Amino acid sequence: MQRDVSPIDNHITFTGAGEGQWRITSIASIAGETMPSSTHLKVGLKNVSENAHGAAFVLNGRTSNIRYTTRAELGDLQQKQSPLGRTGARSAALIPIKKSAQWWAMAQDERRAIFEEQSRHTSTGMDYLPQIARKLLHCRDLDEPFDFLTWFEFNPEHSHDFDRLLDRLRQTEEWKYVEREVDLRLTIA
Ligand code: HEM
């Protein structure tokens, strides 16, 4: 995230461009179509984002209310999680995700059961806090190509931990409903 973005600002634009505060080190398709390559990523508020003319890609997302987290889980997360923008967190990942029509056709309780009771998304993720800082942005209702933009920041020495977390999550029942996923890795420019 842009280091001067306030936590109350909720509509974020990610722009793939020739310059920006993050340098893109890799773009890999995990499922479905990949994204255009670009050297840098700009992260900013939508209303102040610079002219996207000539950008390789522009992705928008906004923060939203929680869907699946219980009160007890929320308490645990708040106690353990770390903020974005930490000094040593010079590595980042932007992972846009789209889930299938089958996922969205289910009821909330069915999705929660797959997300946590079967796949242990939150409890697995908790193993990687506070080293990995995260931000979840929603874009399913914004007429965007993805449903979610997930953002992570960590000290480069925790890259392997982050990869291990991804391995674990990608083997779960929840990930059977992921139809498009692109994994962008970044380092502070
Ligand atoms: C760093 C540790 C992680 C923790 C603690 C964590 C925790 C959570 C929690 C609590 C939610 C539910 C929010 C709600 O109630 O609506 C969530 C949603 C989500 N997370 Fe994670 N997560 C982590 C890592 C990841 C990673 C690495 C990815 C992507 C590769 C990811 C992708 C998502 C997505 C796409 C959702 C939205 C799911 C949906 O609404 O269908 N998370 N995460």
Image (cartoon, rainbow, N blue to C red):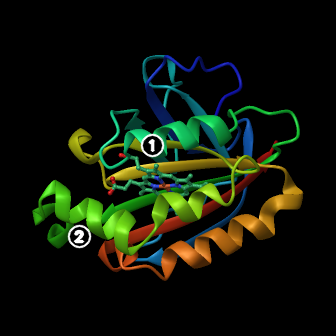
* Numbered tag placed on residue 181 in the rendering: none
Q: Residues within 10 Å of mark 2 (few under 14, many from 20)?
A: few
Q: Is residue 38 above or below residue 64?
A: below
When asked about the image quadrant of residue 159, the answer is bottom right
Q: Are marks 2 and 1 in contact (CB under 8 Å)?
A: no
Q: In percent of the image, x 30 and y 70: which residue is there?
A: 114
Q: Amino acid at mark 2?
A: Ser
Mark 2 — residue? 100
Q: State the quadrant of the N terminus.
A: top right
Q: Position of residue 83 (x, y in %)?
A: 68, 32
Q: Position of residue 17 (x, y in %)?
A: 61, 44
When asked about the image quadrant of residue 89, the answer is top right
Q: Amino acid at mark 1?
A: Ala
Is 135 on the left-hand or right-hand side of 60? Answer: right
Instruction: In this rendered view, identify the residue nearer to me: 101 or 59.
Output: 101
Q: In percent of the image, x 73 and y 35: which residue is there?
A: 21
Q: In percent of the image, x 84 and y 50: which residue is there?
A: 155
Q: Earlier in the sequence, mark 2 or mark 1?
A: 1
Q: Position of residue 45 (x, y in %)?
A: 50, 23
Q: Position of residue 147 (x, y in %)?
A: 32, 53
Is 143 on the left-hand or right-hand side of 49? Answer: left
Q: Nearer the viewer, mark 2 or mark 1?
A: 1
Q: Is mark 1 within 8 Å of ligand 1?
A: no
Q: Is residue 105 above or below residue 9?
A: below
Q: Is residue 117 above or below residue 63?
A: below
Q: Secondary structure at mark 2?
A: loop
Q: State the quadrant of the C terminus.
A: top right
* Numbered tag placed on residue 72 in the rendering: 1
Q: Secondary structure at mark 1?
A: helix
Instruction: In this rendered view, identify the residue nearer to me: 144 or 136.
Output: 136
Is 60 on the left-hand or right-hand side of 30? Answer: left
